[in-house]
Amino acid sequence: MFVLVCLLLCVCARAQDQIVVEVIRLQYEQTQTLVVNRSVEYVVEFVPTEQQMLWPARITAHVSAGDVARPVLLTARQRSGATTWQLPYYHEQRLLYELTRTLCPDGAGGDQIDSEHCDGNDALRGFTLHVGSTCATPVEVTLRAEPARNFLIQYSIDSSFVITKTAPLVALYRWLENQDRARLIVSAEDEVCATVSVQNYTCPIVQSIDAMEMIGLRMTVEKSGAVQLSRSSYPYGFLVVAVVRADQRPCRGDDTNDDPDWLIEAALWGERDESQYVATNKTVTFTVKAALSRGQYVLAACVTIAIFLLFYVAFGALVLARRWEPLSRRIGSLAVLAPHVTDGQPSQTDASVSAASPTRRRRDSTATFDSSDNSDTDSDEEPTASPTASPTAPAPTTETPVTTPVATNPLTSSTPVAFTNVIRSTPLVNSTPEGSPEVIRSDALNATTRVSPEVPIPSASPTQLSTSPQATTDSNGRFYYFQEAVGNARPLSEVDRPFGLPAELRLAALARRRTRVLRARSDRYLHTLYTVAVFYALPVVQFVAAFQMVMNVSGSLDICYYNFLCAHPAGALADFNHVFSNFGYLLLGALLMIQVRARRQRRVKKPRHEEYGIPAHYGLLSALGAGMMVVALLSASYHVCPNGLNFQFDVAFMYVLAVLSMVKIYQARHPDVNARAHATFGVLAVLIAIVVWGVLGGGALFWGAATVLHVFAVLLLSLRIYYVGQFRLEKQSLFVAARGFQPRSRPLYAARLVLLLIANAVNWMFAIYGLFMQAADFASHLLNVLLANTLLYMLFYLTMKLMHGERPRWYAWCYLGGAVAAWVPALYFFMSGSTDWSATPAQSRHKNHECMVMDFYDSHDLWHMLSAAALYLSFAAMLTWDDGLSAVRRTDIAVF
């Protein structure tokens, strides 16, 4: 009896655990509600009509309740395989109770024939859906299947779709006959974040965010996106899958709340759930367009190279024109050759100067500006006796000799011989900063004769003296001034002449160093640039190559900030046109170096007189040309995979060119007080460090510090320029400078002061703008500041030349006109931009635009090419705009 009771209980328990499976047949576009629990399951057969069989099936399921721990499981079984989903499920930490999925169509991946092991009876090409649950509580499940009639994307026809968080879009593009490449363009009107994935036409179709991170190409999209695809990578066509993101941060970054009162709302009502305010649907439009053919690639490349080769043709034409007698006078410039030098022989000037026994003095290690040292080694040589102006000078010569008046000493020509001796007085300045001249000597400035301090000054009538103050120096080279119509000399006070500076500066006072020393100092810029470029460029190339490999392996198009609407791949490069457009920097930089080299060789064959013209700085000019070539390499490397982590590669040597340009302009009139190469590149290293801080850190603290540093640096450099390198950041220098700017005191150099005030006003505006805007792209902000200062300094230099009656030669005006014509559109295209690495990838694509020239180049490519031409023409203008002074004595050349 007991045994019978036990058996009965076991049968009852088994009956309770038995699962009932019901089979239901449904038509497409028919809605059915089922109730499932752990004891009831359904097998639903969806049967399409002949017309519905032409499209893949799209299944929609909805549950009334449920638990993710014991969800409702749905398994779709087709001829190509099975796929399982669960309801409810988490979508980016949002719990969803509905899903819509597109099933893999028959024949996907080239599966067009039946296996020989199957019967091949495919008269009914539907699918079955198995619905079950392990939850004891009954759950209502609503099912509906329908054909995906908008499954295909047509060539050159806009295809619009509406997608939601629960219903991803799946669309197919089939290759046309003889079509090898195509561009997929995505556009939308709203800014709802979505992820677009491009997959091979195979099964299964990945339609969830987590799975899409592991397969195919993908990108986040708000309003714009594009990608170029090839038939070799997608032989059967490609599937486009688009999913609306529940979380907007992948497209907008961490700062998704634009409400300025969010802090008050959070304090009063608590932090709100941003998902409640995110739209649930998005309308996107897909368009497939033709990609460029190989012929278009070749045409664009050849036209670009031909345009830059025209500069070589023009340069060659000028070289040939110099050898033709009718044009040589118009192209060549008057010049005074060195004495006792014939064509093809080296100059005797350096040999004669070096024959004098010099005394050595060690340079202070803190000196950053070239001073009165005359050595190209680590030690500085200062001759015991400085050369004086010769009473006569050879006539300036070109291809056709011309005559010039003999230079005379203005002091000795208007005063008796006995008056050339003066009494030694107290020096003007007792001490000067290390590393700079003790004072700027004026004996070369006024061509006075160095005299003995022991002979008293004889009486002289006012007619024997100059009517304006004349400067002379004692045996130590310190300044003294003669009063008007007074027979004795006295040193002026520091209030009248701060730092002992003369009222009118002449180049002779600042160009006392030997030619070979100036050449060595200038060449050091070129050698330093080579060293920096090698150590900087090699890691850059390795770094960006690794970025390209990561993008190719991961499939994420958000790693690199391309202009996807105008990015043309070639080989391993995903954006060939932005790499190739840097070729102009390389060609024109090499041309500038050739031009400087040719001019340098002419100087070797026909050395110039050292007391005439502007001292040549060919090493610094060659460094500008080499810098352009390095810009070509670094900018091309950056555009292999542009992003915020390597943006400084693109602008680093643009900083170098801007700073070296300002150094070159200043060095033309201040050769003895110019910055040293190691100090200049040290400043550039600090700038790069600040840029890295701004790009990676930023914030209010950074912008405050950067603004203070910017203003302080501009004020310091202004004082250095105004006082001709004599100002130092010391108590005594600050005291002298402050007294020089008292309200009742007259400015020492009025024109220089006005232009420096303008430059300070421009820099203050940049500083204030950066402080208030606090843009994330600090690297571009600094580049704008440096470019603006460089262009402003060029304008200042040209204005001062014209104010002093100096007229550049016609070809220099041509260079300047061409530079202006290139800079204006170049800066416009630079400011417009096609990407923004400081934003998220999806927001950066808002700036993407179609190609503008030959369907190959966009605005940033035009910036590359126009700025290359503008830089070359600007540097060529710097090389030639002082050619008109080659036959002018340095005692007559103004300093500004």
Image (cartoon, rainbow, N blue to C red):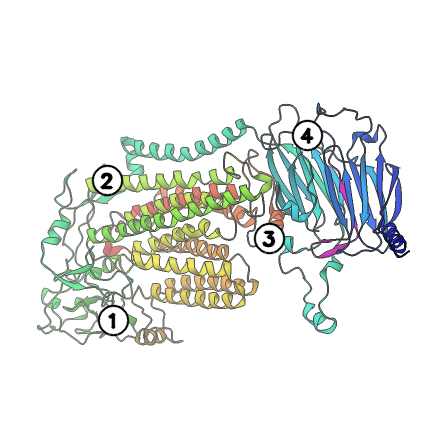
Secondary structure at badge 3 equals loop
Residue 96 lies within the magenta run: yes
Residue 231, position in %: x, y? 60, 30
The amino acid at mark 2 is Arg
239, 59: nearer the viewer: 59
Is 124 situated above or below 263? above
Is 355 positioned to the left or the right of 265 in the image? left
Q: Earlier in the sequence, mark 2 or mark 1?
A: 1
Task: Give the distance between the C-alpha atoms of the residues marked 4 and 3, in whole angstroms.
Answer: 32 Å
In front: label 1 or label 4 = 4
The amino acid pointed to by label 4 is Arg
* Mark toward the start of the polypeptide (1 vs 4): 4
Please identify, in this view, whether the residue under mark 4 or under mark 3 is nearer the observer. 4
Residue 222: in sight, yes or no? no
The residue range painted magenta reads 88-105
- Counting the numbered discs, the total is 4
Outermost residue on the right side: it is 1
Q: Position of residue 428 (x, y in %)?
A: 23, 74
Label 1 – label 3 distance at C-alpha: 54 Å
* Type of amino acid under label 1: Thr
Which mark sits nearer the N-terminus, 3 or 2? 2
Residue 58's image quarter?
Answer: top right
Q: Residues within 10 Å of mark 3 (few under 14, many from 20)?
A: some
Question: Viewed as shown, does residue 280 lie left or right of 382?
Answer: right
Q: Quadrant of residue 814?
A: top left
Circle 2 is placed at which residue position? 602
According to the picture, the residue beneath numbered tag 3 turns out to be: 840
* Badge 4 element: loop
Numbered label attached to residue 174: 4
Mark in the foreground, 2 or 1: 1
Residue type (three-letter) at the residue carrying disc 3: Thr
Q: CA distance from mark 2 to mark 1?
A: 39 Å
